[in-house]
Image: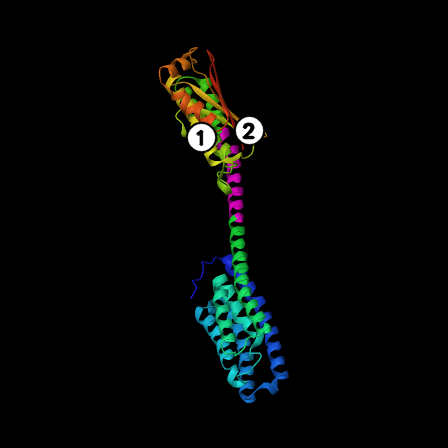
Amino acid sequence: MPAAEPRTDSAFAVEDRLYAALALVRVVVTLNMVGLNAYRRDNFDHPTVGLAIVVALAVWTGLAIWLYHDRARRTPALLLADLAIVLAAMAVTPWVKSTEFNATIPGFWVMGALLAWAIHWHWRGGLVAAVLIAASDLLPRSEVDQGNYGNVFLILIGGPIVGFMCASLQRMARERDAAERAAAAAEERTRLARAVHDGVLQVLAMTQRRGAAAGGEWAELGRLAGEQERSLRSLIRQQDTVPAAAGGRVDLAGALEAMATAHPVRVEVATPGGAVLVDAHVVSETVAAVRACLDNVAAHAGDGASAWVLAQAGRDEITVSVRDDGPGIDPGRLGQAAAEGRLGVVSSITGRIEELGGTATVQSGSWGTEWELTVPLA
């Protein structure tokens, strides 16, 4: 028995529609079965038994439509009974007609059970049912002609294909629901961000200004309010970025935004308005280089130093500038450190960017230090 795949509400909704369509197919193939057997009534060695079988199959059609209509009744036992009736009707055909029979009693009526298995158990169910039906059709025959081969071939490829399509429809429904939930969550986050921006951020900004004007202990309170305002603005900004995308691509802008609250240095981050999707390795190496720049600020610029990270996306590359207001780097200091074998800057910043095919340049003076990291987007 093939194992049933997990189903969600959307998958059950797709399954309901498929079984509703199958009900119409059952009616059509049942009318076809009754008509053909009535037309071929002279081919029966036991016409009374043949008539009873045709009536029983027609009754089962109505019962099956009713049973499959309710999800709670679509159990493996129902599917097994449905297929067992098909196989039994095919098995008694040589006795009811003759050993030289041409067409089985159910004929195309077997499609009802075949498609039911394909809907419920997808391509595996369609394949299992198709193999059993094909074997029941071919084994009693003394000779297989081109028509019989064609019918069996269509059954063997039709069952798995219908099952595969059913699985695809259910998977698409689940993906649609997930996308709708993500869109609803993003809309709610945006609404909350607006509410926070209109309320909390304005209060923090006012507290910062009033505290700085009052001086004393109020100045310290204003400074803390300013830090919280910057952190909160960064978190709100991250709501509009895409953390990850399909195919291993990651939002570089969002990763840089996260550094505003993840680093001990006071950092202000400005990124493009939308997501900048690049390879995950490029994001990790670029963020590591920026973090190394900020680590140098923490180590050499003093406790009161601040840093600014600015990302600008072009058509083929993105440029990340990391600037601080520290005392700067003494002229020739980086070259001297490299000559002495201390390759921290060379390996952690320049080396990373150059391995990505980009460039890393630094400018420094009494105003501070600025790194410019240029990374190809491709």
Quarter occupied by residue 307 = top left
Q: Amino acid at mark 1?
A: Glu
On-image quarter of the N terminus: bottom left
Q: Is residue 298 on the magenta stretch?
A: no
Q: Is residue 302 left or right of residue 102?
A: left
Mark 2, Cα crowd under 10 Å, few <14 / some 14-19 / many 20+, is some
Foreground pick, 317 / 127: 127
Foreground pick, 123 / 143: 143
Mark sitting on residue 217: none
Q: Is residue 174 left or right of residue 303?
A: right
State the separation of the CA atoms marked 1 and 2: 15 Å
The range drawn in magenta is: 179-202
Q: Does the image show residue 294?
A: no
Mark 1, Cα crowd under 10 Å, few <14 / some 14-19 / many 20+, is some
Q: Amino acid at mark 2?
A: Glu
In what element is the residue under mark 1?
helix
Q: Is residue 183 on the magenta stretch?
A: yes
- The residue pinned by badge 2 equals 317
Foreground pick, 33 / 232: 33
- The residue pinned by badge 1 equals 285
Q: Does 236 sit above or below residue 33?
A: above
Q: Does 99 sit above or below residue 128?
A: below
Return the x and y of residue 218 as percentages of the image width and height.
Answer: 41, 21
Residue at the (54%, 28%) spot, across then down:
318
Return the x and y of residue 333 as percentages of the image width and height.
Answer: 40, 12
Q: Does the image show residue 291?
A: yes
Magenta stretch, main secondary structure, is helix
Return the x and y of residue 370 as percentages of the image width and height.
Answer: 48, 18
Q: Is residue 88 left or right of residue 316?
A: left
Looking at the image, is mark 1 or mark 2 earlier in the sequence? 1
